[in-house]
Image: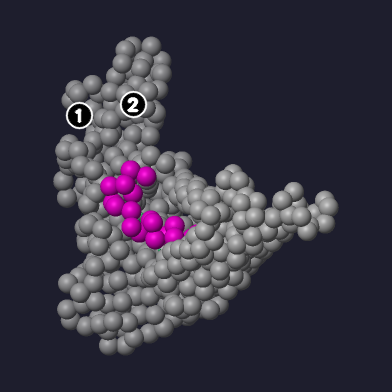
Amino acid sequence: MTDSRRPGRLVAAGLGVLGVAAGVAVAELVAASWRPAAGPVVAVGATVIDATPTPLKEFAVRTVGSADKPLLLTGIAVLLTVLAAAAGILARRHRRYALAAGALLGLIGATAAVTRPTAGWTDAVPSLAGGVVAAGALLLLLNSRPVAEAEAAPAGFDRRAFLAAAVVVGAGAAGGGALLLRRRSGGAITAARQAIDLPAAADAAPPLPNGVGPGFVTANADFYRVDTALTLPRIDVDSWRLTLGGMVDQPATFSFADLLDRPLIERHITLNCVSNEVGGPYVGTAKWLGVPLAPLLREAGVRPGADQLVARSVEGMSIGTPVAALLDGRDAMLAVGMNGEPLPITNGFPVRMLTPGLYGYAGSCKWLTELELTRFADVDVYWVQRGWAADGPVKTASRIDRPLPFAQLTAGTVQVMGVAWAQTRGIRRVEVQVDGGAWQPAELLPVPSVDTWVQWRFAWQATAGPHSLRVRATDARDDTQTADRATPFPDGATGWHTVTVTVS
Ligand SMILES: Nc1nc2c(c(=O)[nH]1)N[C@H]1C(S)=C(S)[C@@H](COP(=O)(O)O)O[C@H]1N2
Ligand SMILES: [Mo]
């Protein structure tokens, strides 16, 4: 009798996957309608990201770029499917495994959700609800009988198939509902962003000098994106607040309108990532609009001894910046605009910090919500906890953009060109070396300030054969880039960018 009720292994595995899918769908629906960040999939994914050792993160950024997040989500889905199938097979003999599977998944999701940096205890609710649903659905499916083995069932009525269909429909509805809710709230934020009419800067960006080459300003759509956010924080500007506190005389809270009421500055500034390899793509230049940070800090009254400004974002990132850098006269700002429009959501909407001359991880917190004046001795921020340098000054760097690596060229004059940067110091000289020969000066195109990259070009008389082209830059302090190769970890890559080409 008991045996006749027992589904085959394959059926049991399928029922396990169905039950868990129903649980996950319900958990995501509860989260989406209430607290999007508390969804188990995103919470577990974000926890995995934070727990990933730095070398592996580096490897991921290097090899898969921004595909790392979809890959992580796919990995979670595959693992969950395997676990669910195993739970179904185990529960076929002992029903308590269904309960154990529901409890385990619920607890994993709940633990991940409540331990996120900005979470509260109630963030456990979606996952726990999902766990209960998963266990319940699995038990229901396992306990029902196919018609062939159930004498009492009416002919043609397969109770298990019916239940399975019901669970599929239910899970599909819950999952679809969750996606719809997410999409709708995302759409509302996108619309609110588009409706924002940013005021003109009180202190506008100086016009770009004549002779600036194409590509000097990076379009928003082409601007690199580096962050740990598995799902984009979608912030409602009306309820958004920025608090300024810690070691200050006058703590303050700002709404978005409060910030826009202050005199704004507009500057071309090049931003780059400490994880960028020599020759890498994680660097871009935009025209930023924002509230200058130094006057804000002076008004608040920074107490003696406060040497670090910790910026925190809505999704829990923390970024520490030396107070000295913020008060030394550079154009550090709370940016609200990028290339003439409100900040794109990917680049920190509605407000991000931006500190010229520091790598993004040390001065440019996106989706900002809190500024705390503190000491480096008292607070280790996110990347510092993971071994990166507490201070993040940009190293002088240069890159060859044309010709592309392994290009096939024809003999004659070839325009070699690229960019070099040393924000806050400026670039004095760029030199090109062909096949290890003498360093030859490249022409520098004009720039609006020391805070942007410099475009350079070099007319090369190319002769037939394989060649290597190499570039190095010297900053305005007369420091030339070192030839020593260093990895991005822990404070930025060094070495000369080299490109190999063939001329015929
Ligand atoms: N909230 C948040 N801000 C962040 C990060 C992040 O992971 N989360 N990454 C930082 C890093 S490492 C860089 S290089 C810049 C990248 O900014 P972008 O994505 O606008 O180019 O954002 C910085 N600000
Ligand atoms: Mo970065």
| Three-letter code, disc 1 | Trp
Q: Is residue 240 above or below residue 40?
A: below
Quadrant hosting residue 196: bottom right
The residue tagged with tag 1: helix, strand or loop?
A: strand
Q: Nearer the viewer, residue 26 or 151?
A: 151
User: What residue is shown at x 19% (from left), y 22% (from top)?
Assistant: 437
Q: Is residue 354 left or right of residue 236?
A: left
Q: Is residue 244 left or right of residue 229?
A: left
Q: Is residue 356 visible?
A: no
Quadrant hosting residue 323: bottom left
Image quadrant in which the N terminus is located: bottom right
Kindly identify which residue carries mark 1. 439
| Three-letter code, disc 2 | Ala
Kindly identify which residue carries mark 2. 459
Colour scheme in use = one colour
Q: Tell me the magenta residue range.
A: 40-60
**Location of residue 163 in the rendering, given as x and y in whole percent from the top left corner:** 71, 58
Q: Is residue 142 above or below residue 10?
A: below
Report if residue 58 lies within the magenta region: yes
User: What residue is shown at x 33% (from left), y 26% (from top)?
Assistant: 459
**Location of residue 138 in the rendering, given as x and y in whole percent from the top left corner:** 60, 60
Q: Nearer the viewer, residue 30 or 376?
A: 30
User: What residue is shown at x 24% (from left), y 68% (from top)?
Assistant: 380
Image quadrant in which the C terminus is located: top left
User: What residue is shown at x 29% (from left), y 39% (from top)?
Assistant: 278
